[in-house]
Image (spheres, rainbow, N blue to C red):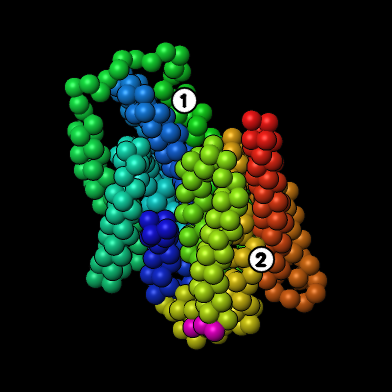
Amino acid sequence: MISFTFRFLFSFVDLAYASVLGRDEVAAIAFYIPFNAVYIAVWVGLSAGFTASLSAAFGNRDESRIKSLKKGIMRIFFTLIPCLTVLGGSLYFLVPHLGLEPGLAEAFQIYGMTLLIGLPLTGFWSIYPDSVVKAHHDTRSTMFAGLLASVTNVLLNTLFVFAFGMGIFGIALATVLSRFASLGYASYRCRALEHARQTPDYDRGPGAGYSSPVRNILKLSVPASLTYALTAGEGAVINRVLISMPDSTLAIASYGVYYQLLMLSLMPAVASSVALLPYLGRFVPEGRHDHIRNDLGRTMGMVAIFALLFTFPTGWFFARPVAEFFLAQGDTAGFVLDDGNLQVLRFLPLAALAALPFLFMRPVFEALQQPRRGIQVSILRFVVFSLPLLVGGRYAAEAMGFAPLSGMICGLILASGAASLMTWSMANRILRNAAAKDAQAASRA
């Protein structure tokens, strides 16, 4: 939970510093959300694929396989990083065709290009040491690497924005350079753990029937990337809808503040969902299904309480100071917040509760060897439910005289709630069926 929350603070810190500069800068960071989701999808997918493959090779004590996997991930890097860097540069030609207001277009061009060119050069290299450390089950080191990078990001943001006056470029550059802090520490721990692993009797020789290391890594990467890729697609549609609204810069900035606060409240749930994989891997074979259901319920209650403790005061008691901090600083002197901006933040508690079951329970399907169910609920959430409801909510709100952004967020909340209900129901049904089969087997025995 600590590691996930501090890693998420990269973008949240950027938003806080951008609020000092103005609404265009806040909106630029908000508009970057789907682009960031693509980066996360690639990073998480490659990390999951490489970590899983490497863990299996460690378990088999297969040194030749370990070496081939390490060479395979490096081949992927040397192909992927130049391609992504070139695509980042192409943003310069794309921005004028996005229909953004002039101030926002300029700020997004600077911020987006700096990140899309810089993050592949600094961020993807950390996949290698980070995955090796995780394959050694040293999660404390990955947590410390995240903390180190976040602290470095804050320090560099302060230096670049306030001391050097570099504006939105300084914020993006701080995010890019801060990745070197986590890369350096993870590399140090990687070397130490790999040195300790080298013992005279470690290598048992090459295994049989292994596929190509590159193909193996990519095969495992695609399922792990799917949810984030669908999130990026949803974010692109949201941006398109926001651009069509009156005063689109303010609408984009308002949504960005709402989204970042919502995701910050959900980080404990996201982190807990990652822990489900090893947890279920241990207790399902032991047939402790009642224990599993009780623990899932308690954990769900715990992360829900945290989300409400954060979102309810933020969205109701402190909605105006929060909105003024992010939207009414910098070059927006004299800007007056209307009720529509504050109403967006008041949806935070309901949005958090609606999203929690889907985020927390969706990995259950992978843990129970039913990944197809996980893919199905993800597609239902981001394609079948989300797209028509967010567009319909926008126009329904306009027809009834409400703020369009509020209607769009209501549609997203309905989509999250429907997907969460379905995910929770399907996961519990699978666990109950597994418990019944174990009980029948025990009765026959």
- Residue at the (27%, 57%) spot, across then down: 148
- Residue at the (38%, 59%) spot, across then down: 2
Q: Which mark is residue 200?
A: none
Element type where label 1 sits in the image: helix
Mark 1: few/some/many CA within 10 Å (<14, 14-19, 20+): some
The span from disc 1 to disc 2 (Cα, nearest Å) is 39 Å
Question: Label 1 amino acid?
Answer: Asn
Q: Quadrant of residue 359?
A: bottom right
The residue identified by callout 2 is 409
Residue 261 screen position, x and y as percent: 51, 68
Residue 172 screen position, x and y as percent: 36, 58
**Is residue 47 found inside the magenta-colored segment of the image?**
no
Disc 1 to disc 2: CB gap under 8 Å: no
Residue 395 versus residue 274 in the image, above or below: below
Residue 106 appearing in the image: no
Residue 250 screen position, x and y as percent: 57, 71
Q: Quadrant of the C terminus?
A: top right
Q: Main secondary structure of the magenta part?
A: helix
Which residues are drawn in magenta? 317-321
130 and 412: which is toward the camera: 130
117 and 135: which is toward the camera: 135
**Mark 1 or mark 2: which comes first in sequence?**
1
- Residue at the (57%, 64%) spot, across then down: 301
Q: Which mark is residue 216?
A: 1
Element type where label 2 sits in the image: helix
326 and 6: which is toward the camera: 6
Residue 369 versus residue 325 in the image, above or below: above
Residue 336 screen position, x and y as percent: 55, 85
Question: Label 2 amino acid?
Answer: Ile
Q: Quadrant of residue 370?
A: top right
